[in-house]
Image (cartoon, rainbow, N blue to C red):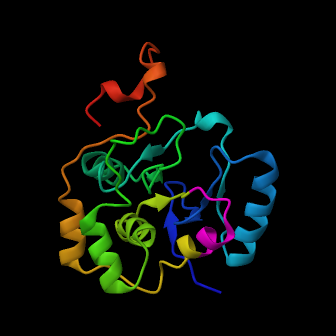
Amino acid sequence: MTKVPNVKLSDGKEMPIIGLGTWKSKPGEVLNAVKVAIDVGYRHIDCALAYQNENEVECHPYLNQNKLIEFCKSHNIAVTAYSPLGSPDRPWVKPDEPSVLADPRIKEIAEKRNKSPAQILLRFNVQRGVIVIPKSVTEERIRNNFEIFDFELTPEEMDLINSFTENYRYCHLNWLKKDPNFPFNIEY
């Protein structure tokens, strides 16, 4: 079984750096997905009710959250990335939106390393010490998403990916803009 690195939390406890996301999964699909994930080796299953929890942020190369991650690290706060693959199956996706999974720079690295673009995106955040929770109910994708610990991106590849300037938020939550706790009105 693959040895998964842990992230140390501020209370000294640890949690796996990769978990299975369950957002938008149909109830009948979640049970099987969790069984597959446990068989593969996942020990972190994210199933927060409506994601009204703390310490999760959208994070991928098109929204790298560098400033927020550095702030959190300086205060001993672990960062968990939701939508680390750009949430391609979100209900409000538009055909003309950019796709981080289809980015030619990501695809070139993936081809060079014989990995999928998803594996490159996940490895990018994991290598930065960011916890990732890619959502899937497909056995093959659950397995592939977990196969990111047998390689490392080079410093040049990390710098390239980290230099993306799209600053694109896929999960904008525009329907919550009038909420006094709307999170995207602050600089992070």
At a point 38% along the width and 63% down the height, the residue shown is 125
Tell which of 102 and 86 is nearer to you: 102
Quadrant where the N terminus sits is bottom right
Query: Residue 108, image x and y in percent?
Result: 27, 75
Q: Is residue 138 left or right of residue 63?
A: right
At a point 59% along the width and 37% down the height, the residue shown is 51
Q: Which residues are magenta?
A: 135-143
User: In this picture, is 2 found above or below 38?
Assistant: below
Quadrant where the C terminus sits is top left
Total numbered circles? 0
At a point 25% along the width and 81% down the height, the residue shown is 154
Query: Residue 105, image x and y in percent?
Result: 24, 67
Query: Residue 163, image x and y in percent?
Result: 17, 59
Tell which of 140 and 182 is nearer to you: 140
Most extreme residue toward the front, as rendered? 95
Query: Residue 72, image x and y in percent?
Result: 36, 49
- Magenta stretch: residue 59 in it? no
